[in-house]
Amino acid sequence: MLKVKNLTKKFPSGDNVVAAVDNISLSVPDGVFASIMGKSGSGKSTLLSLLGALDKPTAGVIDVDGQDITRLGDRQLIKYRRNKIGFVFQSYNLVPNLSALENVMLPMEFAGVKKQERKRRSEELLAEVGLSPEKYIRKPGKLSGGEQQRVAIARSLANNPKLILADEPTGNLDSATGSIIIKLLKDLAKTENTTILAVTHDQGIASQAEVTFQLKDGKLVK
């Protein structure tokens, strides 16, 4: 479960201080697909960086699976990002010289999982996201955009994370493929019992989410 309380991130801007994230509180249970909507400059990217432990807040609490990550040291944060969180990006961010299967295996290698188990789970996850078995050995350049995003989603699930952050996950896809990917994320939230939070400006994504938060000028609005 994700719980955020009074989260604030301030940046200096000339002689002033700007709150890119301004006293945000929200919660999303396990097994729920949620979205954060907002225009460019609303604070979505900053919020995503904070939740993903890529940046530290000025104030507030980020509780993931009962652990306040704002209190973790640098070594603990590395372990948190590796084991508790998965990322899905608009541009897929797959390693181009690795096959689909190898891309999914990679996070488990960093986590010290044995090769046989890495391969077994990677095949299981690729099947779960609907990639055809004959495409497991293909490199990203030989896959369509939708197929690459399926691989990226499988990779995000590799270490059984409690939170998956999806940054504009359908931004490079046509509308039909995008709808399939969003349904896949929604279904995976249930089957994997994980919290999936999609950050987007796409109303179509928000309409399929179970919970939607609206962000404007760093604040949540109703």
Image: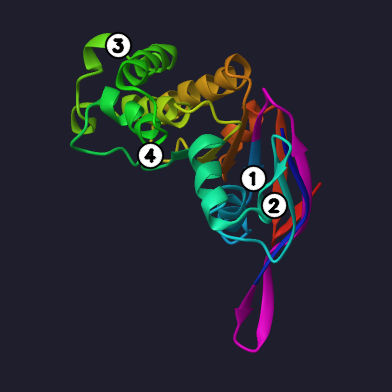
Residue underneath mark 1: 37
- Work out whether mark 4 precedes mark 2 in sequence or the reverse, and give the earlier one: 4
Quarter of the image where one finds residue 37? top right
Position of residue 112 measured from the top left corner of the image (x, y, whole percent): 39, 31
Q: Is residue 220 magenta?
A: no
Quarter of the image where one finds residue 170? top left
How many angstroms separate mark 3 from mark 4 (CA)?
Answer: 21 Å
Quarter of the image where one finds residue 89? top left
How many angstroms separate mark 1 from mark 3 (CA)?
Answer: 32 Å
User: Residue flagged by tag 3: what amino acid is it?
Assistant: Ser
- Work out whether mark 2 precedes mark 3 in sequence or the reverse, and give the earlier one: 3
How many angstroms separate mark 4 from mark 2 (CA)?
Answer: 22 Å
Crowding near pointer 2: few (<14 within 10 Å), some, many (20+)?
many
SS for dot 2: strand
> In the rendered structure, which segment of residues is drawn in magenta?
11-34
SS for dot 3: loop
How many angstroms separate mark 2 from mark 3 (CA)?
Answer: 38 Å
Main SS class of the magenta portion in the image: strand
Is 117 on the left-hand or right-hand side of 100? right
* The label number, if any, that marks residue 215 in the structure image: 2
Position of residue 147 measured from the top left corner of the image (x, y, whole percent): 33, 24
User: Residue flagged by tag 1: what amino acid is it?
Assistant: Met
Residue underneath mark 3: 132
Q: Pointer 3 and pointer 4: residues touching (CB < 8 Å)? A: no
User: Residue flagged by tag 4: what amino acid is it?
Assistant: Asn
Residue underneath mark 4: 172
Position of residue 177 measured from the top left corner of the image (x, y, whole percent): 41, 25
Q: Is residue 29 magenta?
A: yes
Residue drawn at 23 percent across, 17 percent down: 135
Residue drawn at 35 percent across, 32 percent down: 109
- Work out whether mark 2 precedes mark 1 in sequence or the reverse, and give the earlier one: 1
